Structure formats: structure tokens, C-alpha cells
Amino acid sequence: MLSFLLHFHPKKINPAALKFTRTFGLGGMAVLLFVLEALTGILLRFYYIPTTFEAYQSIVNLNSQVLFGQFIRNIHYWGSILLILTTFLHFLRVFFTSAYRDARAFNWIIGLLMLVTVFMFNFSGYLLPWDQLAYWAVTVVTNILLYIPWVGESFYELIIGGKELNSNTLHTFFAFHTALLPFVLLLLLFYHIWKVRKAGGIILEEQNQKSEKVDVMPHLVHKEGIVALVIVALLFVLALIFDAPLLEKANPTGSINPVKAPWYFAGLQELLLHFDPIFAAILIPMGILLFLVWIPYFNYDKEPTGKWFLSEKGKNTTLQTAIFSFILTILGILLSPGFVRFEKLLPGFPGYLSNGLIPITIMVGLVWLFFKYRLHSSKLLKEEKIQAIFVFILVAFVILTLTGIFFRGKNMELMMPWNI
């Protein structure tokens, strides 16, 4: 087993790469969590019955009648959450250390595909308990497909197998969650690791300096083992203290209130509360995705060094951008449900203008003015400018997500912290 694991590493490694702050062990954590998800998922399959008549009761029986059944399900639930978080943090680490350029450009695309696959992996499993929480959360997300012009309705019916969630939907999601997506993720994972090895591992400032390399075993493997034990311990503690949620059996005729998307899609649902669906569900997400795909192929000024920030000036600009994004996003959330709803100010205008193009143009104008003043006046490197734009998007996404999770109450009304 140990010799198999060593295939993921070269025999020897630069001592500088052993610093925990280089990677924070996030890639290894994600791999470990994926393995744990696979193992617990296999155990759950022995008791789970993927039909709308028996799915919910099989979960109830698992929780109450199977030895350690609730504990295994809790591990699977919390492991899925940690897998999303560690994968996303790994994605951020790769970006902020510029490990997405030159020979690593295509591997960045593979990483994005893996991140999307992890989200789909979790989403496909979200429906399987077939309780009220799962049914209506998946309904919210799948309904977004209806906003796709021309082909939205056909695509929606293809995915869920009808006009609303049904037994065909459950079978499809079960097949994707237990067979197709794990296989796809495993293939992408092996290819991703191979590309990292081929590119020479992580980027180091000390890479070109002569230093005697050390054996991966024990210097790196032992550290990875410690991180793995910490992750497993954390997962077990969460599983012992907090049970995976399970409401009453799904009832298509009576929804819960509020109806929220799964937490990792809460930002997208929040965006739909403020902008026309064409912009919120299609144009804005697609624009961000294209920006992320395009990032490795800019003509940058300097070679990547593995530094988190190339200069103090770039670091300060990134911080100021984060503050600006925070303020602008909060103001947008607070104002748009009230007197700055453009469909009220411009009655008779189509929604894609009054609640889409016009407010988007205003916000883009404000962002453009900020970047024109801040980025050009600072004479930043191109990489630092890209980093600032990325941070603006990141902070806005995090604020929207946290708002959707914690500050939306009945009828998706905004709740102030002092009213919670």
C-alpha cells in the first residue's frame, strides 16, 4: 500500500517544498476525503433503496436500526462538505501562488473540471434521502435550467425525466452519484496528479538554487500522515456531534418555507433575487467561468515564483479591492429589495432591461471606475491586476453565499443580524 502511495510523489524532493504553508496539504486532504466518501458510500449502498417509495424509509432504517448506520451517514455527509471546502481552498491556493501558467495551464482547466465535478457529485447525492429538504432544494436548482433560452425546458425535462422531480429523477441522480461522477472524478484526479508531477511539482522560489534533495519517505509522507489523521479526527468529531439532516418524507404538494438551494449554490440563488434570471443564472456565471478558463493564457510580465503576492503594492491593492467588493455587494443586497428595484422605477420596461442590463451596467461602471483609478494608478503587473479582479469576484461570491445561507428567512426575506 505504501509503495502504491509513493507513486504520487517523486523519490526525492526539494526541502523547501516541505513547508506546510506552501500547499497547506489541501490537495492531499481532498484526495483523502474522496476516498472516505467512496468507502462510506459503498457501505450506504448496502441499505439504500433508490425508489421514491423506499428511499426515505431506507434512510430512516439506516439511522435507527443499523449498527453505526447514523455514524456512517454522518461521516459521508460531513465528508462531502469538507470535500467541497478543501477542493475550493486548493483551487484558491493554486491561483494565488500562480501555479496555473505555462506548462500548468491545461492542468488548471482540469482542476476547474474537477471542482465542477465535486459540486455535481454533492448535488446528485443531495436528492437521495428524498426528504422535504432534499426535494425542494433540488427543485430550486433544477428550475434554473428553465431560464436557458430555447433549449431550457427540453434540457430540464431530460435531466429530471419529466415535468417535476419523480422516480426517474431519483434513479438518474443515484446513477450519477454512485457510478458516473466518481469514475469521472477518479480519471481527472489521476491525470491531474500526473500533470503536476510532469510539471515538476509545486512552484518554488528556491527551485533554481542548488540544494540537496531529501527522500520523500519519511520527510513528506510522515507529514501527510499527520494531516490525514487530523482530518479523520475532525470528521469523526463532526459525525459524533452533528447528525446529517433529515426532514419528513418529500411532499411535492407542500413545500417548506424558505425553500433554499444547497449551501454551495446559495450564492447563485441569492443572485436570482437581485437580477433578471437571464443575467443571474446564465450570463454572469458563464462570464465568470470564461474568465477563469482564460486566466492561464494572458501574456504575463514575469515568470511565476510561487509567491502569494508579487509585491507589497499588489498585496495592498488586493486588500483594497476586497474591501470595495465587500461594501458594494452588501449595499447591493440591502438596497435592491427596497427602493432601488429598477422594475419599480421603470414600469413597463422588460425585465431583462429594468432588472438586468440597467443595474448590471451601473455596477460594472462603478467597478470599472474603481479599477481604472486603483489598478492604473498603482502601475501593477498584469498578474496583480488579474489577481485583484479575481478577488473582487471571490469576495462578492462569498458574501452572496453567506447571505443566502444565514440571512434569508421565511419567503426568502432578508433578515438583519439583530432580528435573527
Image (cartoon, rainbow, N blue to C red):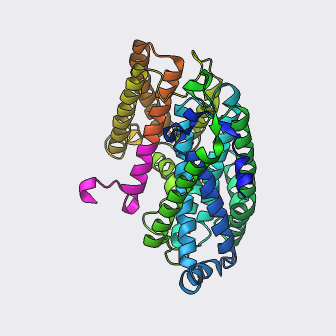
Q: Is residue 241 above or below residue 349?
A: below
Quarter of the image where the C terminus is located: bottom left
> Residue 38 falls in which quadrant of the image?
bottom right
373 sits to left or right of 254? left
- The residue positioned farthest toward the bottom in the image shown: 65
Q: For the point 61% across and 47% down, which residue is it?
A: 218
Q: Does the magenta run of residues contain 200?
A: no
Q: Could you say which quadrant of the image residue 338 lies in?
A: top left
Please name the residue shown 54% across and 85% down the image.
Answer: 64
Q: Position of residue 371 (x, y in %)?
A: 43, 21
Q: Is residue 361 visible?
A: yes
Looking at the picture, how far across and down is residue 231, in whole percent? Answer: 52, 58
Q: Which residues are magenta?
A: 398-420
Q: Is residue 15 left or right of residue 364?
A: right
Above-or-below relation of 193 to 265: above
Q: Is residue 411 above or below residue 249?
A: above
Judge left or right: residue 208 versus residue 159. Answer: left
Question: Can residue 252 be seen in the rendering of this structure?
Answer: no
Q: Quadrant of residue 320?
A: top left
* Image-based side of 296 in relation to 371, left or right: right
The one nearer the camera, 262 or 219, is 219
